[in-house]
Amino acid sequence: MNDTSPSAENICSATARRSARDRIFDAARDLFYRQGIRGVGVDAIAEQAGATKMSLYRAFPGKDELVAECLRHSAAQFWVWWDEVVDQHAPDARATLLALFRGLAQQQKSPQHRGCPIANAAVELTAAEHPARDIVLHYNREKRRRLRALCRQLGVREPDRLAAGLQLLMDGACLSRVTFGAEGPCAALPHTAASLIDAATAQPKPGTHVA
């Protein structure tokens, strides 16, 4: 086949567009995470990507949609990691929960870690009509659903209350990492999670009234 045929040109052109899109996407994820969504403009993204603003707007309708795509990717990565942990420890719900919190604590030790990108975005993006808001809400609702399912497997009296406490702990650790660094309160994440789980699963002493 002649390399200059229309079909070959179309293939090359499509490959180039994908390559530019990938560079823009990777640059946006990096800049949004390190500098914040509000603090990064399309000019900075295009410059870091080695692309033009025109290329950016060809790949994405605008900055808001690019933000949404970045957060969608972050959420997908998080659930892949979560599922891997669950697969390694199922069907032991307690071991699974503790492994999740150990894994989060280990991630927070990285010098490049700046908390959860979706939690960070939730603080910055308050407009209900922003295309990323649904992603933030779905991510947190899914986290609650998964934690509730694991806590119900434990057979505790109030699994949803335990799940709420664990989610508060999980989300609070992300904020603590940004505020105090890796050696701050987030360092106690696995121990604190274990304490909550042990308290919920402890059997009441004989004769003890349980409210």
Image (spheres, rainbow, N blue to C red):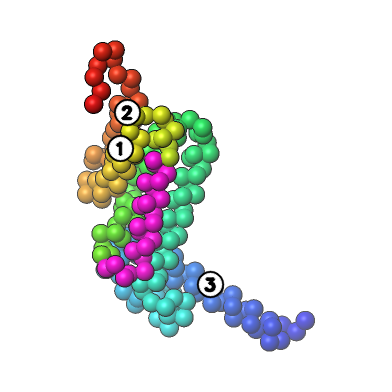
Residue kind at label 3, given as amino acid type: Ser
Spatial CA span between label 2 and label 3: 51 Å
In the image, is residue 84 part of the stretch drawn in magenta?
no
Residue 189 image position (x, y, % from top left) = 31, 37
Residue kind at label 1, given as amino acid type: Arg
Residue 79 image position (x, y, % from top left) = 46, 50
Q: Residue at x 39, y 35 (%)?
A: 151
Mark 2 crowd level (few <14, some 14–19, many ≥20, 10 Å Cα): some
Spatial CA span between label 1 and label 3: 47 Å
Numbered disc 2: secondary structure: helix
Numbered disc 1: secondary structure: helix
Residue kind at label 2, given as amino acid type: Ala
Residue 152 image position (x, y, % from top left) = 41, 35
| Farthest right residue in view | 1
- Residue labelled with disc 3: 19
Spatial CA span between label 2 and label 1: 9 Å
Q: Is residue 13 left or right of residue 20?
A: right
Pick whichever, 96 or 209, lies toward us. Answer: 209
Mark 1 or mark 3: whose residue is earlier in sequence = 3
Numbered disc 3: secondary structure: helix
- Residue labelled with disc 2: 200
| Farthest left residue in view | 179
Q: Is residue 87 left or right of residue 31?
A: right
Residue 177 in sight here: no
User: Quarter of the image holding residue 157?
Assistant: top left
Q: Residue at x 23, y 40 (%)?
A: 184
- Residue labelled with disc 1: 161
Which region is colored magenta?
127-148
